[in-house]
Image (spheres, rainbow, N blue to C red):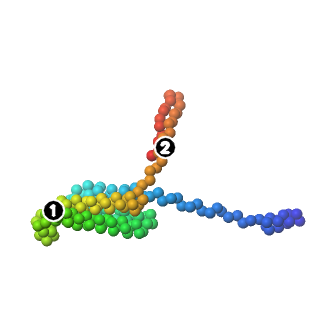
Amino acid sequence: MLRIAALVIVLLTGRVAFADEAAPPPPDDGYGTHVLVADLIAPVMFTAAQWRTRPFVDLGISAYVLGGPVVHTAHRRYRRAATSLGLRIGLPIAGLFAGDLVHHLISSGDPHVWEAWDGPPSPLWILGAAAGFVGAIVIDQRVLAGGYTRKRTAVVPSATAGNGGVTLGIIAAF
């Protein structure tokens, strides 16, 4: 009878135990390094192609245009992926037009290259487009992806004694 009374007391006075609330997600440290690694694929492909092999050139262009958006999508940042795609296409074109505008301000009488093709494009076109490419990569990596976070550097001296003597060293994590 005493056991039944103890069981009734435990059931009536006991509390339901709840697990602690889930810990908040860790702060978004940024994944700009991932975007930077994706962006390094394009110059590697262009270098491998040396502008002669069409598949490598196509892969390089695809890696430039889609590298950042794919990384943003992998991190479930879909608006940033769309913004990255717009930057990667729009800024080089805007740079190209800015180079053309500067070219016409310097030499006002020359026709547009697309109106009368008479040779290679203006160096200002190439400079403007290159500035657009680099600008898109920098904005994508630093602003949209949050840049990169420096890991804490730890340096610890170490000493190990053995039969053959003592080994001194430094252990570091970067």
Of label 2 and label 1, which has the lower sequence position?
1
| Residue 74 in picture, x, y percent from top left | 43, 64
**Residue occupying image coordinates x 35% and y 61%:** 139
Judging from the image, what secondary structure is the residue with disc 1 in? helix
| Residue 44 in picture, x, y percent from top left | 29, 55
**Residue 59 visible somewhere in the drawing:** no
Give the position of the N terminus as an image quadrant: bottom right
**Residue occupying image coordinates x 37% and y 56%:** 37
| Residue 3 in picture, x, y percent from top left | 85, 63
**Residue occupying image coordinates x 44% and y 58%:** 30
* Picture quadrant where residue 68 is located: bottom left
Residue 76 shown left or right of residue 11 in the figure: left
What is the three-letter code of the residue carrying label 2? Ala
| CA separation in Å, label 2 and label 1 | 55 Å
Is 25 in front, or is 131? 131
Which residue is disc 1 drawn over?
Answer: 106
Give the number of the mark in front: 2 or 1. Answer: 1
- Picture layout, residue 69 above or below residue 43: below
Which residue is disc 2 drawn over?
Answer: 154
Residue 34 shown left or right of residue 26 in the figure: left
Direction right: furthest residue? 1
* Picture quadrant where residue 2 is located: bottom right
| Residue 42 in picture, x, y percent from top left | 30, 59
What is the three-letter code of the residue carrying label 1? Ile
**Residue occupying image coordinates x 27% and y 64%:** 92
Q: Residues within 10 Å of mark 1 (few under 14, many from 20)?
A: few
Direction bottom: furthest residue? 115
Judging from the image, what secondary structure is the residue with disc 2 in? strand
